[in-house]
Amino acid sequence: MQDLIVQKYGGSSVADVERIRRVAGRIIETKEKGKKVVVVVSAMGDTTDDLVSLAKRINEHPPHREMDMLLATGEQISISLLAMAIQSMGHDVVSLTGAQCGINTSNVHKRARINDIDTNRMEKELAAGRIIIVAGFQGINENNDITTLGRGGSDTSAVALAVALEAELCEIYTDVDGVYTADPRIVTNASKIDEISYEEILEMASTGAKVLHPRSVEMAEKFKVPLVVRSSYNHNEGTIIKEDVIMEKVLVRGVSLDENIAKISIFEVPDQPGIAFRLFSALAKANIHVDMIVQNVNRTAVNDISFTVDVEELQEAVTVAQKFAFEVNAQKVEYDQGVAKLSVIGTGIVANAEIASKFFEALFELGINIQTISTSEIKISCLIDKERGKEAMVHIHKKFDM
């Protein structure tokens, strides 16, 4: 849609009345430049965490459907208050839930995926000259039940709306000025990156960088949606995310740390064809995302298998692993929440042995043991003790002079 911009504001950007009014003013600025505006908003501040805590005081293992029903209310508070602020400043505006703006999802609760978006309602509102404020992180399934898209789902909502409405740009507003070479709250001298490729930001997001959710980047790359990450607190230039620019020089773009993971290990699994398939297909059926996987060397016809999952999915993953272990007569299942994934990211780095050598040398200098290593074309990751994660991140950032 010509002259349409989709903007997304995170929870910290709308955490109180003053910030809501500031965001309202920013949206109006965009509108007054002659743009149509669709805005996706997250829940205020710590609202989602507070709701999760409340639910667990009622029921230690709350049903996923009811959690979606509960958590979706956080965004509905944000969109209504923001719409009220914009209306008080003299502009026509309407707030819409995920269901009202036509976001149709799969039937999986807590981790639903967007199937399609019916844009009819939004097109009518935009044609009437209204600003649209959309509740992020949510949609509706074929049973007319509210679903949520999982942690970071508001980013995915914003990009999906930009795709469906053929927006000229999707702006992600956050509490930092853009994408940095490392988390500036941990590495104080981290540098802002002016431009970065979809591939590089996807790896950074997948390895713990908190600026964008990986699913939103995947969608932006697939449909070539122009993305800009910038601060909601100032008008500084942000980071432009676009297609890769081919470069001869190997370049380490950033270092990331993911502390929101846990390692599960299954010991003495029978060394037989199809065993790994049985385990990971069971995890897939439970909609549990698995990241790093290691199978130890065969010994006396058994193996040990270790893998990492998101901490939020640990309980379900352990249940699946224990059932599998019982069925195949494995020895035991253990899990460890005291781990973190540390990564360096940059186009072509896996082909440069010097990068890996320098990365592992930095950990050696700190006396940090590596539990697991994984690589892709543009990243090297390792699993280390969580308590040493931030220290390692700062040292590696300095080591590569980023």
Image (cartoon, rainbow, N blue to C red):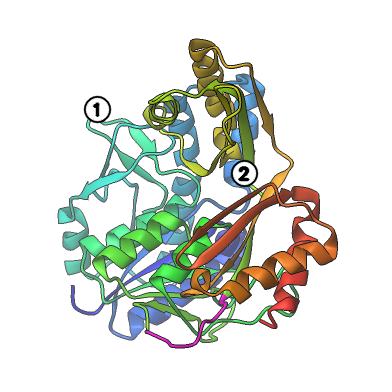
**Mark 2, residue position:** 261
Which of 385 and 181 lies nearest the eye of the viewer? 385
In the picture of the structure, the residue carrying the numbered disc 1 is 143
Front residue of 220/233: it is 220
How many numbered circles are shown? Answer: 2
Residue at 37%, 28% (x, y): give it.
Answer: 285
The answer to whether one can see residue 121 in this image is: yes
Q: The C terminus lies in which quarter of the figure?
A: bottom right
Q: Which mark is residue 315?
A: none
Q: What amino acid does circle 1 point to?
A: Asn
Q: Position of residue 121 (x, y in %)?
A: 19, 54
- In three-dimensional space, the C-alpha distance between marks 2 and 1, rounded to whole angstroms, equals 32 Å
- Image location of residue 136, percent across then percent down: 41, 52
Q: Left of 100 or right of it: where is 359?
A: right
Looking at the image, which is closer to me, 56 or 207?
207
Q: Is residue 281 left or right of residue 347?
A: left
